[in-house]
């Protein structure tokens, strides 16, 4: 291993943040109520991200109204055995 790389791995690095379009802080629905899901609205706003919406339904979002209006909190993980994708049956094979 290059000694410069070894030294660099112990140095703190700046956090890398994801930036994506979202609604403004003062966004409101037509009836005047504030929009609470200004960040998650990027994924739930229509038919732009049907795959993401299918994953939200599989993860337990009860209906379309909740998906469109309720704020959503995302927790990232590199491995989740409850993933509703088609490869869930292969987890046991991969782990062995």
Image: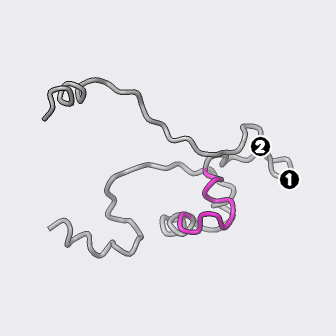
Query: Does 68 sit left or right of 33 as displayed?
Result: left
Residue stretch in magenta: 40-52
The residue positioned 65% from the left and 61% from the top of the image is: 66
How many angstroms separate mark 2 from mark 1 (CA)? 10 Å
Query: On the rendered structure, is 6 left or right of 27?
Result: left
Is 42 included in the stretch rendered in magenta?
Answer: yes
Q: Nearer the viewer, residue 7 or 73?
A: 7
Q: Quadrant of residue 54?
A: bottom right
- Looking at the rendered image, the quarter that the N terminus falls into is top left
How far across and down, in percent of the image, does residue 83 sit?
38, 65
Disc 2: which residue:
27
Q: Are marks 2 and 1 in contact (CB under 8 Å)?
A: no
Location of residue 82 with respect to 86 vertically, above or below: above
- At 77% from the left and 45% from the top, the residue drawn is 34
Q: Is residue 7 above or below residue 50?
A: above
User: Percent x, y for residue 36?
Assistant: 69, 46
Q: State the SS at label 1.
A: loop
Residue at horizontal 66 percent and vertical 45 percent from the top: 22
Q: Residues within 10 Å of mark 1 (few under 14, many from 20)?
A: few
Numbered circle sitting on residue 54: none
**Residue sitting at x 21%, y 71%:** 92
From the image, which quarter does the C terminus lie in? bottom left
Residue 30 badge: 1
**Picture quadrant of residue 50:** bottom right
50 in relation to 79, above or below: below
Q: Residues within 10 Å of mark 2 (few under 14, many from 20)?
A: some
Q: Secondary structure at mark 2?
A: loop
């Amino acid at each position: 291993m290059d000694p410069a790389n070894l030294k660099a791995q112990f140095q703190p690095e700046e956090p890398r943040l994801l930036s994506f379009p979202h609604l403004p802080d003062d966004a409101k629905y037509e009836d005047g109520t504030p929009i609470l899901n200004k960040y998650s609205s990027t994924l739930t706003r229509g038919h732009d991200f049907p795959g993401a919406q299918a994953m939200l339904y599989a993860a337990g979002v009860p209906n379309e109204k909740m998906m469109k209006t309720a704020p959503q909190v995302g927790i990232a993980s590199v491995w989740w055995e409850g993933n509703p994708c088609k490869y869930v049956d292969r987890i046991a094979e991969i782990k062995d």
